[in-house]
Image: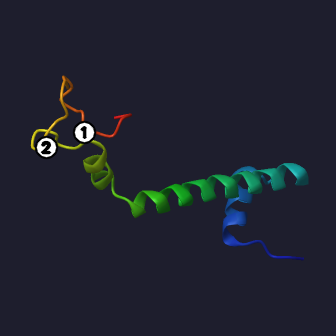
Amino acid sequence: MVRLGYTARAIDNLCCSNVSEPRRIFTYKTFVLILTFFVYCSYHLSRKPISVVKNVLNQNCTNMTDPDHTNNSHWCDWKPF
């Protein structure tokens, strides 16, 4: 018999002890998908701090020369922001 890993045993003890085999496999796959998503998001959040991105998207336009006939004080910002 194959021994389960620590995480699989923990999931099995928490929610899958009296469940059929297909349901147990579905639970394992769902857990791995959610875990992978959070690890992926954490990786990308750590790559580019929000403060760096915010400074690029929302710039200070007061020290720059604005184009003619501009009434918007945020004309130099990135368009969606």
- Image check: 1 left or right of 56? right
Q: Which of 20 and 77 is in front in this view?
A: 77
Q: Which residue is drawn at 28% across and 49% down?
A: 56
For mark 1, does the 10 Å Cα neighbourhood hold few (<14), some (14 to 19), or many (20 or more) residues? some
Chain-order first, disc 1 or disc 2: 2
Residue 78 in the image: above or below residue 20: above
Label placed on residue 76: 1
Q: Which amino acid does label 2 sit on?
A: Met
Which quadrant does the N terminus fall into?
bottom right
- Image check: 72 left or right of 17? left
Which quadrant does the C terminus fall into?
top left
Q: Is residue 53 visible?
A: yes
Label placed on residue 64: 2
Residue 75 in the image: above or below residue 50: above
**Residue 28 at what x, y percent from top left?**
75, 57
- Image check: 19 left or right of 28? right
Display coloring: rainbow
| Count of numbered badges drawn on the protein | 2
Q: State which quadrant residue 63 falls in.
A: top left
Residue 35 in the image: above or below residue 3: above
Determine whether the residue tagged by mark 1 lies in a helix, strand or loop.
loop
Q: Nearer the viewer, residue 55 or 41?
A: 55
Determine whether the residue tagged by mark 2 lies in a helix, strand or loop.
loop
Q: Which residue is drawn at 67% across and 70% down?
A: 6
Asked whether the residues under the numbered discs 1 and 2 touch, taking CB atoms below 8 Å apart as contact, a structural biologist would say yes
Q: Residue furthest front?
A: 68
**Residue 60 at what x, y percent from top left?**
16, 42
Residue 81 in the image: above or below residue 63: above
**Residue 50 at what x, y percent from top left?**
33, 51
Q: Which amino acid does label 1 sit on?
A: Cys
Q: Residue at x 51, y 55 (%)?
A: 41
